[in-house]
Image (cartoon, rainbow, N blue to C red):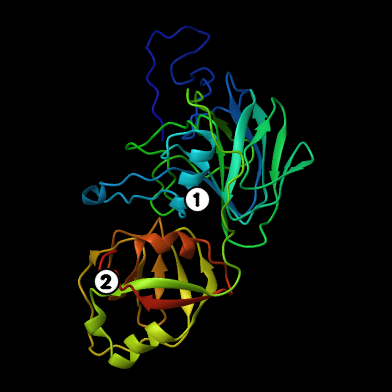
Amino acid sequence: MRVRFVARDASPAHPAGKPGPEPEKPDRNGTTGRAPAGRALEVIATGPLATVQDLGRAGNAALGVGAAGAADPAALRLANRAVGNPEDAAAVEVTLGGFAARCHGGTFAVVTGAPAPLTVDGRAVAPYSVFPVPDGAEVRMGPPPSGLRSYLAVRGGVAVPPVLGSRSTDTLSGVGPEPVRPGTLLPVGEPPEAAPFLDVLPVGRPAEDEITLRVRLGPRDDWFTGEAVAALLTEPYTVTSEIDRVGMRLDGPPLARARSGELPSEGMVTGALQVPPSGRPVLFLADHPLTGGYPVIAVVAAADVPRAAQARPGQRLRFRPDRRGTR
């Protein structure tokens, strides 16, 4: 709620208790809905979900603030390299395509991650390639044939106001800019001095079939039977429709506990495989909670989390021990 204070001898035009029209104020994305004064992306459609993401606000867990950031940070870094941005510049993370925006001021852009079909004013352009977007042109993204999340990076980065040092939207806590919606104006920053040196990115698309992820057991694998640990490391698990930026619920052999009772709340990390009483594990992603009371049987290697973040409902995952000895 807002409170407005006015002078007791307010003018007849705005008597006390009847303030005049309130000036238009920007939302958490720093936009007011008016035409942009500089370079910007005017969002037309978002698809299932579109958010602004950078590499996250690490180092605030003691304050109860999660890192958030791109679910597939490798794809974000690649997109920023392609257009000459710093690797931590903000971009638009798009889930399962359907995103469309009008460019104000002109820019260069690239899409990495899930290879969504792209058009600029109806002309097809290729994902994983840098393409110009003239002033007034519309960029549209269709549903990708594989993968879940695409990253639209523009030269100069998406310049919404940072919160605690990051422009990332945390969908669990609400920290950061609001999720993108039709009509949102996303300001674009000043282009970097260095010119991009890549035009086509020679990378493979996300897997369409089974994905193997390396894990390290623990810290609570001793809460589970030997058969449960063996099942985790040998049997496939299927990604269910219960999936978002917080995590994904998996279906497969239930993981039976070797002891009863519950744990006190413990810190959680991205990639943790937490097992609730149902025995079906939950794999935590970028917007995961900071604490949890269910035991974590294993943690996915940090280098493999981006591939997990591109898994779609119905896709199968297998977990293998990480022999490198470090995450």
Pick whichever, 111 or 186, lies toward us. 111
Q: Quadrant of residue 254?
A: bottom left
Residue displayed at 33% across by 72% down: 322
Query: Residue 75 bears which disc, if any?
Result: 1
Q: Please state which of residues 154 and 94 is positioned toward the viewer in this rendering.
A: 154
Q: Amino acid at mark 1?
A: Ala
- Tell me if residue 188 comes above or below residue 290 in the rendering: above
Q: Is residue 217 left or right of residue 113?
A: left
Q: Which residue: 71% across, 27% down?
A: 136
In the depicted structure, whether residue 169 falls above or below residue 21: below
Residue receiving disc 2: 293
- Against 44, is 207 above or below? below
What residue lies at 65% left-to-right and 48% top-to-bottom? 127
Q: Tell me what residue is drawn at x 67 percent, y 61 percent.
A: 145
Which quadrant is home to the N terminus?
top left
The quarter of the rendered structure image containing the C terminus is bottom left
The residue lying toward the viewer, choosing from 187 and 321, is 321
Query: In the image shown, does 7 or 154 lie closer to the viewer?
Result: 154
Give the left or right position of residue 48, taking residue 243 as reference.
Answer: right
- Dot 2 alpha-carbon crowd within 10 angstroms: few under 14, some 14 to 19, many 20 or more: some
Q: Which mark is residue 197?
A: none
Position in image of residue 319 (x %, y %): 41, 77
